[in-house]
Image: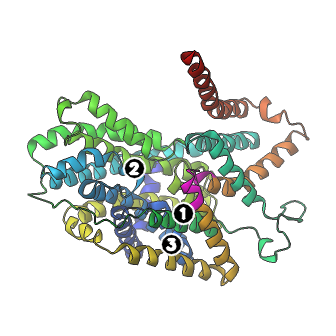
Amino acid sequence: METFLSLLSGFSVAFTLQNLGWSMIGVTLGTMIGVLPGLGPAATVALLMPLTVGLEPVSAFIMFAGIYYGAQYGGSTASILLNTPGEAGAMMTAIEGNAMARNGRGAQALATAAIGSFVAGTIATVGLTFTAPLLVDLSLKLTAPDYFSLMVLSLASVTALLGRSVGTGLLALFFGLFLGTIGLDPQTGQGRFTFGIVELLDGIDTVVVAVGLFAVGETLFTVANLDGAREKIHAIKGSIRLSRADWARSWKPWLRGTAIGFPIGAIPAGGSELPTILSYTLEKKLSKHKDEFGSGAIEGVAGPEAANNASAAGALAPLLALGLPTSTTAAVLLAAFQQYGLRPGPMLFDTNPNLVWGLIASLYIGNVLLLILNLPMVGVWVRLLMIPKPWLYGGILMLATLGTYTLNGNAFDVVLMWVLGFVGYLMRVMNVPIVPVILGLILGPLLEQQMRRSLAIGQGDWTVFVTHPISALLLVLAAVIVLMPIIRHLRGARRIPQHQS
């Protein structure tokens, strides 16, 4: 009952004319970004963070959440009509969706994607509404060593699951942890790794890092890989309405995709890619029309799109309740919280309930707005694919530069952003994951704080981390997650010489 009343108060916040406007702006921008290949919700939120400094936190996060949900919706349009996923979670949609478009059923593919996204997004948001308070109650029972180990587990999970190897993930993580130590030591007040640069005494702004690595780095990588060839867009033919047979083949995949996407989105599994792959594989196994897979099975669009959108709501649960991001966009949203001097977690529900519940309520509203935007206006979104790429990406880089300068009016931030942008580009070229860098930068100081607090509790005894049962269990899980890929690789290396001999 308390959760229901809190949600009602959240709707009173989200239904103000101002916040409805920001929600509409967010879902519209998110859909546009999802449609345009090469730029995802994480890069967009990072790009807009410097420009939202003057906004009220509630309005800013309602817009950011709209961008997050909107990009999940919009990614299907480019996947279906262009065979180019607008964002990573839409890659499985491209397989069957583009085949349907080639067969003249692109309208039906877009319809099942939009309706499935609405169904999954709404159900998953209900799950978020009731799961987040439960996680808050659980987190209030955790001690300092437990929090330390929970952060270690989060860092270990994302580091091990992203990138081509554990080594590249650890390299990115340690780089992020290093960036997090730059500035004044919180206990002694001594400068650390400032190299005599006065601007570094306050540390590196997470917004500058996010804009550099995500917005600039991703844009440079996309531009470097443009081949100049004209992309073929399949025309939308026929009515966008689904037939009775299409409904019958779609509703179960929508529900199954939601059931897969929400829980996997809530764990550090790298975002929406894993649930969409699992959903596609499951639908292919359960379908009565297996012969259509690869040539335009509607189940192969309905299931992955539902899983994609459900995972977005799942990622917000641990972010809001525990302050732990489980996806790329959630990591950037965590940086946005820091921009406003806020720390997501159990205390946020007490100190700023209007923000938390206003944000959750806005997700319900955003889902309805997205359904209204996506079905009737699909022709408008298709025209976005005609924008000349030099204009698009040049505008993004200019916006990133101006936005970063407006943060503090400091040219040093702009130089640092571009340096990190080139670093982000090189990381993408070498397939080094970027998310661990952001997590290391944001969670590193918190990790240090909880470690010092734990050692103070244990009077300097390091065994305090293993004498607390929950802390010990979390550390064991973190070790298993990091070591398992290494052990698997070593076993594979041993089998190859034996097979050759």
Secondary structure found at label 1? helix
In the image, residue 147 sits, relative to residue 402, either above or below, namely above
Disc 1: CA contacts within 10 A as few (<14), some (14-19) or many (>=20): many
Work out how far the residue at label 3 is from the one at label 2, CA to CA, in angstroms: 21 Å
Residue behind mark 1 = 214
* Residue closest to the eye, 91 or 244: 91
In this view, the residue farthest toward the bottom is 409
Residue 155 appearing in the image: no
Q: Which of the two residues, 378 or 419, is positioned nearer the viewer here?
A: 419
Residue 105 on the magenta span = no
- Viewed as shown, does residue 178 lie left or right of 68? right
Q: Is residue 411 left or right of residue 164?
A: right
Residues at discs 3 and 2 in contact (Cβ within 8 Å): no
Horizontally, is 292 left or right of 214 in the view? left
**Magenta span covers which residues?**
425-436
Of the two numbered discs 3 and 1 in the rendering, the one whose residue sits closer to the viewer = 1
Label 3 is placed on what type of residue?
Leu
The mark nearer the N terminus, 3 or 2, is 3
Residue 247 in which image quadrant: top left
**Mark closer to the chain start, 3 or 1:** 3
Which residue is disc 3 drawn over? 48
Task: Tell me if residue 228 comes above or below residue 329 in the rendering.
Answer: below
* Residue 26 coordinates in the image, percent (x, y): 40, 68
Residue 404 location in percent, x, y?
Answer: 59, 77
Q: Is residue 97 visible?
A: yes
Q: Is residue 201 above or below residue 469?
A: below
